[in-house]
Image (cartoon, rainbow, N blue to C red):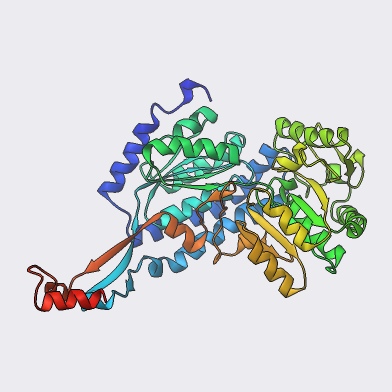
Amino acid sequence: MDTAARPPSLNVTLAELRDAWNAHRPDYAQRMDDLARLRAAFKQRLDGLVDAMSADFGRRSRHESRLTDGMTVLHEIDLVRSNLRRWMRPRARQVDWTFLPAGAEIRCQALGVVGIIAPWNYPVNLALIPLVSAIGAGNHVMLKPSEFTPRTSQAMAELLADVFPADRVAIVQGDANVAAEFAALPFDHLLFTGSTPVGRKVMAAAAPNLTPVTLELGGKSPAIVAPGYPIATAAARIAAGKLLNAGQTCIAPDYVLLRREDRDPFIAALRDYVTRHYPNLRENPDYTSIINARQYARLQGLTDEAALRGAQVLTLPDAAAHDIDARVFAPTVVVDAPEDSRVMQDEIFGPILPIVTVESVDAAIDYINARPRPLALYHFDHDRSRTRHVLESCVAGGVSVNDCIYHNAQSELPFGGVGPSGMGHYHGHHGFLTFSKQLPVFRQARWSSLSLLRPPYKGLADFVTRFLTR
């Protein structure tokens, strides 16, 4: 986006949103109406958004788009509208007995203007779900969608302009320079979804304003296949999670840890899964293309470097499945890659699956704990005691046991990372709380027991003070 097309001032837009919020803070009725109109407009325009996403990717599974970027948004709106009155209700809290008969409560108060920076991999889901949370919490929103999905970003801008006045929800489009300027604005809260390196820049940009941030990042999410777990089942479920959106998913399993004797049967089961579920992969409409040539070249570079350094690189079902012109990167397994190779150091974000052999589940735990904390952890095991040991030993943003991805789809579970994989949470009630100030309120009674603790501290006051510090 060139300078001439850029909005005259992001600060002006932010000021307009904040002035409008101060003049009329959205109440329950306004929030419910906003979300109802958003749902109706979104459902009406969903096919157009699916078309836009497919055009931006070159080829994107329409069914996956409807599920991951359609169903998820509709479900989130329904969840917030069903629970909003209860979430907004003040919650009574006990006071210490020494303060009786006073009372206390927590009130969820809207913050003001929330900034959202959305990525390209799920361009609708990761823009609109945090927007739904922010609107439900009573905020105004300034949204920066990804420049790498321009058709989808424009379609969302048109959708939101039809639903919201410009001083309630504003869309900012532009390149990385615009995103950097956006992140430096003095929002009341900023949510960023993207890579860990860019997340560091966003946090640094927000720091001068002391803007609270929620960072939804990524990293290398491991999958452990424990001894005795059915290899074919583990392979099928890991493949399903890995190949969703062609691996361009922040919580996709990044690498697999299993015993050496299970490695070859696991690879054979992966090959069988790809053959059965993605026949004629180069032209298969259910297999998504890589977003752009730059990302395709990055993935090719990961496997090329690993191969040059002695790793075994296996393309599934075979090397002919790659199509560089259509940006179809076939599922690829990497075996015995050096630990310092890029495929073992960088977040892969594509359909490449390294396999790491370990002697035991404890060795897998040690391997994971020696690395930055992942956004997701997947453990495949029917031994409940051993599974509990893994859950108690590893720190991760979220966990699915005996499957992949699905913890992210549970509305009652918070979604978010830890450390290098992110900070803060959203989804469902957790998103409402993220975009609210949980305001503590103390209410003094007509008669205050604290009147017994006033100078001069002698007699009864002296006795009470000594009693309370006994």
Residue 404 visible in the displayed image:
no
Q: Nearer the viewer, residue 243 or 349?
A: 349
Q: Relative to residue 348, is residue 67 depicted above or below? A: below
Q: How far across and down, in percent of the image, does residue 292 sit?
A: 70, 33
* 334 on left or right of 122: right
Q: Nearer the viewer, residue 455 or 99?
A: 455
Residue at 12% x, 73% y is: 451
* 399 on left or right of 354: left
Q: Relative to residue 18, is residue 389 depicted above or below? A: below
> Which quadrant would residue 31 be assigned to in this image?
bottom left
> Which quadrant would residue 234 be assigned to in this image?
bottom right
Residue at 70% x, 45% y is: 248
* 435 on left or right of 461: right
**Quadrant containing the C terminus in the rendered view:** bottom left
Q: How far across and down, in percent of the image, does residue 61 sit?
A: 73, 48
Q: How far across and down, in percent of the image, does residue 458 sit?
A: 9, 73
Q: How far across and down, in percent of the image, does residue 148 sit?
A: 62, 34
Residue 38 visible in the displayed image:
yes
